[in-house]
Image (tube, grey):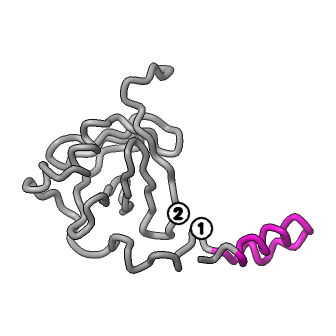
């Protein structure tokens, strides 16, 4: 992991030396790289995946919040509704708890765990936390 360089960069920033912090990527790309779902390759809905636990959980626990913004809905058939526009989603082959979600022209990988998820934007490894907001009385 790249924890030590990140902590050094943060300490340098606090001391008025921002260069090291500016040079860091948005996310740790060294940890578990082989275990992460790929961004390239097939990213299409497969009807046979409807019975997969991750697919059922994504649909059943919808809607979700994306970085605190509610209105992210995994719909049946691979349709995706977001506050930013429609998209598509599906299960990553070979990853039982990993989904892809592509919207506003950007590919994302999502790893589910209970009622929370971690989404990683493929273009720059930026991470967004998601959580199910099903049944919550959110402001309109």
Q: Name the residue at 39% across, 41% down.
A: 115
Residue drawn 51% across the image and 76% down it:
31
Dominant secondary structure of the magenta stretch?
Answer: helix
SS of the residue under disc 1: loop
Q: Is residue 23 left or right of residue 59?
A: right
Magenta region, residue range? 4-24
Q: Name the residue beneath numbered marker 1.
A: 26
Q: Residue at x 77, y 77 (%)?
A: 20
Residue 55 at what x, y percent from top left? 22, 49
Question: What residue would you read off at disc 2?
Answer: 126
Q: Residue at x 43, y 45 (%)?
A: 116
- Asked whether residue 10 is drawn in magenta, I would say yes
Dot 2 falls on a residue whose secondary structure is: loop
From what the image shows, is residue 129 above or below residue 70?
below
Among the 4 quarters of the image, the one containing residue 100: bottom left
Looking at marks 1 and 2 on the same chain, the residue that comes earlier in the sequence is marked by 1
Q: Position of residue 58 (x, y in %)?
A: 28, 44
Among all residues in the image, which is located at the extreme left? 48
Of residue 14 and residue 35, the one placed in the foreground of this image is 35
Q: In the rendering, at what x and y percent does residue 88 appear?
A: 25, 52
Residue 4 horizontal/vertical position (percent): 72, 76
- In the depicted view, which residue is nearer to us: 105 or 65? 65
* Quadrant into which the N terminus falls: bottom right
- Which of the 4 quarters of the picture holds residue 24? bottom right
Q: Are marks 1 and 2 in contact (CB under 8 Å)?
A: yes
């Amino acid at each position: 992991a790249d924890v030590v360089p990140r902590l050094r960069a943060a300490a340098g920033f606090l001391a008025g030396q921002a260069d090291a912090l500016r040079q860091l990527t948005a996310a740790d790309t060294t940890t578990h790289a082989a275990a992460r779902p790929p961004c390239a390759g097939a990213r299409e809905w497969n009807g046979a995946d409807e019975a997969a636990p991750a697919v059922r959980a994504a649909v059943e626990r919808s809607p979700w919040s994306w970085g605190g913004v509610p209105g992210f809905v995994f719909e049946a058939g691979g349709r995706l509704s977001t506050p930013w526009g429609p998209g598509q989603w599906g299960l990553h082959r070979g990853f039982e708890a990993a989904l892809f979600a592509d919207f506003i022209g950007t590919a994302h990988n999502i790893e589910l765990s209970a009622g929370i998820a971690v989404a990683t934007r493929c273009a720059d490894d930026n991470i967004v936390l998601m959580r199910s907001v099903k049944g919550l009385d959110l402001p309109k």
